[in-house]
Image (tube, rainbow, N blue to C red):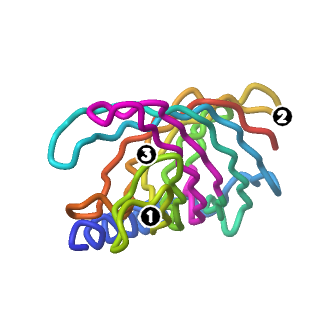
């Protein structure tokens, strides 16, 4: 919990610092943007070890401007690993649903780097999770993500997102700390 509070404070500080450095007359943002990305999530198993593995999937985001360069963001993502190292044929499927804020700083007319903080939940299934009554095939918990990326303007209504990197935290049951510290990479397109 201490790590979570530290990360939340860091994300809030970075967001506020970015807001303080914004120019007084920003370039107008589009009313709504939709992004579709391929994502890869790096995590580890077993607990306390590093049988690290990647799960693959995708994400869809909707962003709408709130004030100057600040947007509200809603994200739905899903990743799947067919095999977790050290657990035989057991896999893992995750669906995350989060919302938060994004600060975008335009650099000229072509580049738009951004940072964001998202909070919500994650539903995990097609795996095994400890519970008071034994093993369950699914679990749901709190989730958060903090990170950033770069959008490159291709046309008035299309941007390319070559890279997005996020730290993703989850609290799924695992017979230990019930915490997962993941790293997610994504790339895709943005329609506005």
Q: Which residue is mark 1?
A: 15
78 vs 28, left or right, is left
Q: Nearer the viewer, residue 142 or 159?
A: 142
Q: Where does residue 116 sit, x and y in percent of width and height? A: 50, 56
Quadrant position of the N terminus in the picture = bottom left
- Distance from Cα at disc 3 to Cα at disc 1: 15 Å
Q: Where does residue 170 sit, x and y in percent of width and height? A: 39, 59
In the rendered structure, which segment of residues is drawn in magenta? 75-104
| Label 1 crowd (10 A; few <14 / some 14-19 / many >=20) | some
Mark 2 element type: loop
**190 in relation to 10, above or below:** above
Q: Which residue is mark 3?
A: 166
Q: Which residue is mark 2?
A: 156
- Distance from Cα at disc 1 to Cα at disc 2: 27 Å
Looking at the image, is mark 2 or mark 3 earlier in the sequence?
Answer: 2
**52 in relation to 68, above or below:** above
């Amino acid at each position: 919990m201490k790590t979570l509070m530290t990360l939340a404070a860091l994300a809030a500080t970075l967001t506020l610092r970015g807001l303080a450095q914004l120019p007084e007359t920003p370039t107008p943002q589009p009313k709504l943007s939709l992004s579709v990305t391929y994502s890869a999530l790096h995590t580890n198993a077993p607990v306390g070890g590093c049988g690290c593995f990647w799960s693959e999937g995708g994400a869809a985001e909707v962003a709408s401007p709130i004030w100057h360069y600040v947007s509200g963001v809603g994200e739905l993502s899903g990743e799947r690993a067919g095999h977790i190292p050290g657990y035989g044929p057991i896999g893992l499927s995750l669906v995350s649903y989060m919302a938060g804020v994004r600060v975008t700083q335009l650099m000229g007319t072509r580049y738009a780097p951004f940072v964001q903080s998202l909070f919500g939940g994650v539903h995990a299934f097609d795996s095994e999770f400890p519970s008071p009554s034994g093993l369950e095939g699914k679990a749901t918990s709190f989730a958060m993500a903090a990170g950033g990326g770069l959008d490159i303007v291709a046309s008035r209504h299309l941007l390319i997102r070559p890279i997005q990197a996020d730290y993703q935290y989850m609290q799924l049951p695992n017979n230990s700390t019930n915490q997962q510290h993941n790293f997610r990479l994504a790339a895709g397109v943005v329609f506005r």
